[in-house]
Amino acid sequence: MVGIYFSGTGNSKYCVCKFLEEYDSRCPAFSIEQDEAVAQMKNNREIVISYPVQFSNIPKILRDYIIANRQIWNEKRIFIIATMGLFSGDGAGILARLLKKYGAVITGGLHLIMPDSISDEKVLKRKYEKNLELIRNADAKIHKAVMQIKNGKPPREGLGIWSHAAGLFGQRLYFYRKTKSYTDKLNMNQKKCIGCGLCEKLCPMKNIRVVNGTAVSGNKCTMCYRCISKCPQQAITLLGKKVIEQHDINKYL
């Protein structure tokens, strides 16, 4: 088995690594940003994919990756881990349906509530102790899921018709445009920016450049919040107007 993930602030990476640690510590995990990920998937029949749900949908960067590598998925047995801030009816299901188009066999799905990563909105902000509790709960749920898999009864969260309806009517119908395309709404506060270049290095889309000492963004942001959560000056926003709390999974480990 091999683990594949896309992760903005570390939640999805943490969850797939924890899953593999429980399942078989010899199994490696790779980001979709790593060149060797494709070769690893080609050489493994069993794959676990972990990703953060965005508005009950797949991040654009991951959707494009699945489609670009569509020749890989035929007859692969794939377990899906969907991480989220609160609720997504079919977080695992929306990715499952895309993979099935290319011949994948979906073995199960798991939904994990993790600390909120949307740094510039007050919604879902929790106390430090509550976030620690969320991670402990996720750890326990991952352990249970692995035991179920080993017993031949993997969880199938988000994969049924009622889950599909919940995801569709709960968020996706109203926010479909949020993830249909990349966004050009990333805001760089030129007064705060010190031109350190960290955001440029972190961006998975190569959407940020430092020009004449300040960061500028293009139109291909995939809303991962990586740059916003790491900016030392809190100079970057996306959905909100100011940074409320920067998030990184390492704060809780």
Image (cartoon, grey):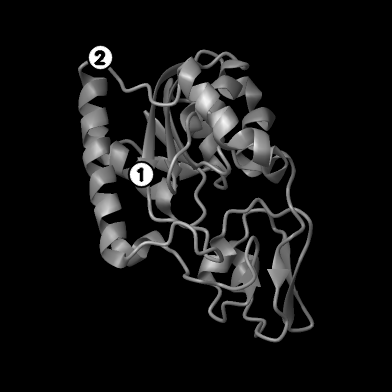
Counting from the top left corner in percent of width and height, residue 159 is at 45, 21
Left or right, 138 with respect to 210, comes to left
Q: Nearer the viewer, residue 34 or 152?
A: 152
Counting from the top left corner in percent of width and height, residue 180 is at 72, 39
The C terminus - image quarter: bottom left
Which mark, by number, is residue 121? none
Q: Is residue 181 above or below residue 193?
A: above
The residue that appears at 45% across and 44% down in the rendered structure is 84
Which residue type does callout 2 highlight?
Answer: Gly
Which residue type does callout 1 highlight?
Answer: Cys
Q: Nearer the viewer, residue 248 or 175?
A: 175
Q: Secondary structure at mark 2?
A: loop
Q: Secondary structure at mark 1?
A: helix
The N terminus - image quarter: top left
Within 10 angstroms of label 2, few (less than 14), some, or many (20 or more) residues? few
> According to the image, label 2 marks what residue?
152
In this rendering, the count of numbered labels is 2
What distance separates the C-alpha of mark 2 from that of mark 1? 21 Å
Q: Nearer the viewer, residue 107 or 121?
A: 121
**Callouts 2 and 1 close, C-beta under 8 Å:** no
The residue that appears at 54% across and 23% down in the rendered structure is 165
Left or right, 145 with respect to 189, comes to left
Left or right, 184 with respect to 14, comes to right
Q: Is residue 190 above or below residue 230?
A: below
> According to the image, label 1 marks what residue?
15
